[in-house]
Image: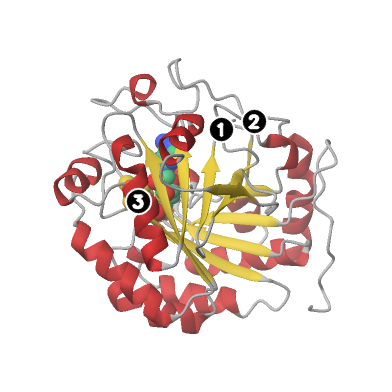
Amino acid sequence: MTESSNPGQLIDRFGRTVDYLRISITDRCDFRCLYCMEEEMTFLPRAQILTLEEIHTLAKAFAELGVKKIRVTGGEPLVRKGALGLLENLGRIESLNELVITTNGSQLETMAPALKAAGVKRINISLDTLDADKFKTITRTGDLHQVLKGIRAAQSAGFERIKINTVVLKDRNHQEVNDLVQFAVDHGIDISFIEEMPLGIVSRHNRSLAYYSSDLIKKDLEPNFSLIAIDEKTGGPSNYFKVVGTQTRVGFISPHSENFCGSCNRVRLTVEGRLLLCLGNEHSVDLKRVLRANPGNMAILKQAIIEAMLIKPEKHEFNIHERPVILRYMNMTGG
Ligand code: SAM
Ligand code: SF4
């Protein structure tokens, strides 16, 4: 731990300690997943986004305030120029226990070894289907085989843990949950099923009709897999189960069917430098403004972060059956 570390200063009004920061390092992406973005997107101009140096400074401030885990995400984090250098710098922050990333896998075939060398310990790779045509339909621009090659490259690189993230959509990929668990078992990796969240308004996709609950997924898996609940508390929204007789864990992220806010330990930094205190609320603080108004002043920056904890809401306000009240998309949010 560094001398300037001052752990445990990030405590909200409900007594929850924040020790996990997710950073969206770009809003851009090479895919256009239909639940995440529109096909035609306007991305942020460069002047509006944090530089890589600013992201590094913010990460250091959070680490000095007791953050132990950072997840780098996006948009697609690995399409941002300089992402690897940033990860190397983050990997050098001594007081961090964990540096992890979430990626769509498109760049992993070439980047996996360098990510491992940069200090990335665990990696989440999104994979909604094993059918190449469906993959193209859901991601609009993605190539399943490229992602599968990326998963293989990540396995060869030797990360501590690789997890597949699958957003389950009724009648699009819900029929594949057994095949996806079998894929995870065959590859000795984990998988989490995610209920879709109403972030941003997406056309040509009805979130209410596509809703498929974690309970339904569990029922679908029952005939083929024995799942035993494991007490793996990550402070996160996932409930984990072990597939009996295998190395694989299956997680369920159920914002609608279960409320996971009571144990929330995380905040999110958008690429615009907005600190989001909750995935499902708009409460935020403009840290880019603080940073740019006070160059080099870590004390003011840290004070702004500490004060931000006072507006962390108690729980999210998602309702899949209503028009979204959260107008930012997941790529802005840092899923
Ligand atoms: N591009 C990377 C990827 O796809 O893994 C990282 C960013 S992406 C926003 C992070 C995760 O959020 C992915 O697993 C994606 O499937 C998920 N996601 C995106 N939009 C979502 C939504 N509306 N509801 C639930 N999960 C969503
Ligand atoms: Fe890109 Fe990830 Fe959003 Fe898909 S889910 S469009 S890969 S940011």
- Looking at the rendered structure, the kind of residue marked 1 is Pro
The answer to whether 186 appears left or right of 318 in the picture is left
Can residue 277 be seen in this snapshot? yes
- Looking at the rendered structure, the kind of residue marked 3 is Leu
Q: Is residue 264 above or below residue 72?
A: above
- Looking at the rendered structure, the kind of residue marked 2 is Asn
Q: Is residue 72 above or below residue 85?
A: above
Q: Is mark 1 within 8 Å of ligand 1?
A: yes
Q: Residues within 10 Å of mark 2 (few under 14, many from 20)?
A: few
Q: Which residue is mark 3?
A: 180
The answer to whether 230 appears left or right of 162 in the picture is right
The answer to whether 165 appears left or right of 21 in the picture is left
Residue at the (62%, 80%) spot, across then down: 92
Q: Which residue is mark 1?
A: 255
Q: Is residue 24 above or below residue 138?
A: below
Foreground residue among 208 and 250: 250
Q: Residues within 10 Å of mark 1 (few under 14, many from 20)?
A: many
Answer whether labels 2 and 1 touch (C-beta < 8 Å): yes
Mark 3: which secondary structure? helix
Spatial CA distance of label 3 from label 2 is 25 Å
Q: Which residue is mark 2?
A: 259
